[in-house]
Image (tube, helix red, strand yellow):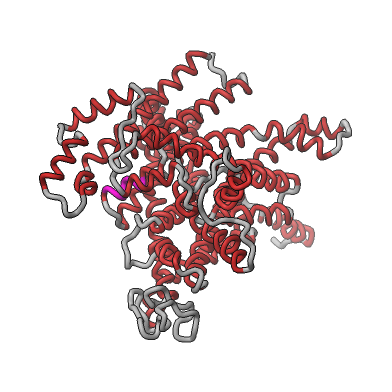
């Protein structure tokens, strides 16, 4: 068990290392010039050279990579070219926003997705099944930005015109400062993210629950005379939710690394927005930091899912 | 020799039994698909969009406006805003006074091209890598399977943005980026199936008569994988189209002034308050296309395996 876990952990670290290497190579192979971007269009060649030197960009590539890896092993992610702040504190200030967005949205898509999935599985091929599936598939079929724009149009713009300022279109208030304002600002982003994600969960829940409801022990439960609701929820859903939990782990891992489009549309100062800014300003240390953090979350999520499986189902546990 | 009445009756009675021919799983699936109203509606929608894409120049000719022709005097109001649907511009104009109808028809070309080509590339790559990994096993499998896991665990939208900003946006790079982040999902499924099919008797029989690795992989194993690959590929098309629209929205997709649905939606951002038709029609075109492919994919899955459920497909967020 411990060996299995250690192997997965090592593999995860390998993925992290290769990912960071890939990003590093990508940015140095490609024509780019952050010093010129920083110094401005009117800067003299001397100024650009000075900026290059200060950033350490005039040193040979292997040298730069070695010092990057060396600092990384000490937990130092470097210094942002553009924001003039340590990358670590930049990331730390953005993470709560992204976490609030991802976790809140997960609650919404779980309620909607699993709800539709259960309703559909209880009466397959019924009107509820077809209607619910069509509804969530419509969400899946829309690009995230389109869902966001629709919500902004109807729930912000039209409501505002009608005199109801219920939902702000952008901005963020920390939870610790004002829980009400926090939820109010995040409600539209939550719904946006949940809309494009719910279909995955309803598909999973529907197929998994349909399969479980065909099992013998469900027939036994029904034969015992248990109420149908209890059979479906207590006996069926409990074991049907395993793939849903797996998917949730993977999705949260992916989203915690930054929700680029949703944060962009709603002006949320999270990791995704920072990533977007850093790419447009060629702020390599920040990009590296975000890619590393994002990959780390994905690796961690996969690890937790594997671990959860091994704990839940002894057959998965390798000897 | 003449047939007796009894023999004749027997012959006709035997007809229905003779009519029950052996039908292949594909024929059964096709029959199921044809009875599924959702599948029919989706297929018709996709054909209509494809027709619009092919006929885009004809549409432009019919209304007399090119896709990039600007009509500052008749296509914009005095205040310089888009004009709404009218007899001259059936779906209204955009912020530069261009005909939305013509641009939507041309946009269908980009969306379908990206969706289909990226899916084809990803499918071929996924099938080949998955087959090789599953067939050879051992070290080859370990390396390829881990590589696929790695591609699947990339924060892909972020890397796509980085790639595009480095190489500069273009149609080719858009297609390649989408294909690169999609093939591994197919590869993983193909590998898993190949691992189990490889142990079947008929594969062993093929080996015993001296078939080579290529023949076993592509002639013996591949046909058994077509069903899941077909479903995955159908569901990949809408994902690719949405991905392209997202890249265009971020300004990293196909370069303007080429009309794309994502680009038009992006242009409409500052005008939705005064010109509802500007985001509405490109948005509807996009939604109709992706929803049709998603519904068709689900129907194909149900038709191929009525007992199987509907698997997960993740889009971009």
- Residue at left offset 50%, top offset 26%: A303
Q: Looking at the image, which residue is at 68% across and 48% down?
A: A116
Is B228 included in the stretch rendered in magenta?
Answer: no
Visible in this render: residue B57? yes
Q: Is residue A312 left or right of residue B44?
A: right
Q: Give the image location of residue A228, x and y in percent.
A: 83, 39
The relative height of residue B198 versus residue A43 in the rendered view (above or below) is above
Q: Is residue B13 left or right of residue A36?
A: right
Residue A316 drawn at (x, y percent): 57, 22
Quadrant in the rendering for residue A47? top left
x and y, in percent, of residue B248 in the image: 38, 58
Percent of width and height locating residue A6: 46, 17
Q: Is residue A246 left or right of residue A288?
A: right
Q: Residue at x 73, y 37 (%)?
A: A214
Q: Main secondary structure of the magenta part?
A: helix
Q: Which residues are magenta?
A: B160-166
Camera sees residue B23 = no
Q: Which residue in the rendered view is the most extreme toward the right?
A: A225
B52 or B161: nearer the viewer: B161
Q: Residue at x 58, y 61 (%)?
A: A156
Residue B165 forms part of the magenta stretch:
yes
User: Residue B127 versus residue A67: which sits nearer the camera?
Assistant: A67
């Amino acid at each position: 068990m411990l060996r299995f876990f250690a192997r997965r952990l090592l593999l995860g670290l390998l993925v992290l290392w290769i990912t960071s290497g890939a990003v590093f190579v990508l940015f140095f192979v490609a024509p780019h010039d952050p010093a010129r971007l920083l110094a401005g269009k009117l800067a003299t060649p001397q100024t650009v050279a000075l900026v290059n030197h200060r950033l350490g960009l005039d040193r040979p590539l292997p040298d730069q990579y070695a010092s990057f890896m060396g600092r990384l092993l000490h937990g130092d992610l470097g210094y942002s070219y553009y924001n003039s702040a340590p990358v670590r504190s930049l990331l730390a200030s953005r993470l709560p926003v992204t976490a609030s967005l991802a976790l809140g949205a997960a609650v919404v898509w779980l309620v909607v997705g699993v709800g539709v999935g259960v309703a559909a599985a209880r009466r397959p091929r019924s009107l509820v099944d077809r209607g619910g599936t069509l509804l969530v598939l419509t969400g899946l079929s829309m690009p995230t930005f389109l869902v966001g724009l629709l919500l902004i149009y109807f729930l912000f713009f039209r409501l505002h015109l009608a005199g109801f300022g219920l939902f702000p279109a952008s901005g963020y208030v920390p939870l610790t400062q004002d829980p009400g304002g926090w939820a109010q600002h995040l409600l539209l982003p939550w719904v946006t993210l949940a809309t494009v994600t719910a279909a995955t969960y309803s598909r999973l829940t529907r197929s998994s629950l349909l399969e479980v409801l065909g099992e013998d022990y469900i027939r036994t439960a029904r034969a015992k005379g248990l109420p149908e609701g209890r059979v479906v929820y207590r006996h069926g859903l409990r074991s049907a939710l395993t793939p849903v939990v797996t998917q949730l782990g993977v999705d949260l891992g992916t989203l915690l690394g930054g929700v680029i489009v949703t944060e962009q549309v709603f002006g949320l100062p999270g990791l995704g927005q920072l990533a977007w800014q850093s790419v447009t300003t060629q702020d390599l240390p920040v990009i590296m930091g975000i890619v590393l953090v994002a990959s780390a979350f994905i690796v961690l999520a996969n690890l937790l899912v594997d671990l959860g499986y091994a704990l839940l189902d002894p057959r998965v546990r390798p000897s | 020799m003449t047939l007796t009445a009894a023999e004749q009756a027997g012959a006709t009675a035997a007809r229905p039994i003779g009519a029950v021919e052996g039908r292949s799983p594909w024929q059964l699936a096709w029959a199921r698909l044809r009875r599924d109203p959702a599948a029919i509606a989706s297929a018709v929608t996709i054909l209509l969009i494809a027709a619009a894409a092919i006929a885009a120049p004809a549409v432009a000719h019919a209304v007399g406006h090119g896709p990039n022709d600007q009509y500052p005097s008749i296509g914009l109001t005095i205040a310089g805003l888009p004009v709404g649907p009218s007899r001259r511009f059936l779906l209204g104009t955009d912020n530069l006074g261009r005909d939305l109808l013509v641009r939507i028809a041309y946009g269908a070309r980009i969306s379908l091209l990206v969706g289909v080509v990226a899916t084809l590339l990803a499918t071929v790559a996924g099938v080949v890598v998955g087959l090789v990994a599953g067939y050879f096993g051992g070290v080859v499998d370990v390396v390829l399977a881990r590589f696929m896991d790695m591609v699947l665990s990339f924060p892909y939208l972020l890397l796509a943005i980085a790639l595009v900003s480095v190489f500069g946006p273009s149609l080719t790079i858009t297609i390649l980026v989408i294909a690169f982040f999609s093939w591994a999902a197919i590869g993983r499924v193909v590998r898993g199936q190949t691992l189990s099919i490889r142990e079947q008797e008929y594969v062993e029989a093929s080996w015993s008569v001296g078939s080579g690795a290529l023949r076993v992989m592509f002639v013996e194993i591949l046909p058994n994988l077509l069903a899941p690959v077909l479903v995955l590929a159908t569901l990949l098309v809408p994902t690719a189209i949405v991905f392209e629209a997202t890249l265009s929205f971020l300004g990293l997709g196909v370069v303007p002034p080429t009309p794309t649905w994502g680009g038009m939606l992006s242009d409409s951002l500052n005008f939705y308050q005064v010109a509802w038709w500007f985001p509405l029609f490109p948005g509807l075109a996009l939604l109709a296309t992706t929803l049709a492919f998603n519904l068709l994919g689900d129907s194909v899955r149900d038709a191929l395996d009525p007992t199987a459920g509907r698997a997960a497909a993740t889009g971009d967020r």
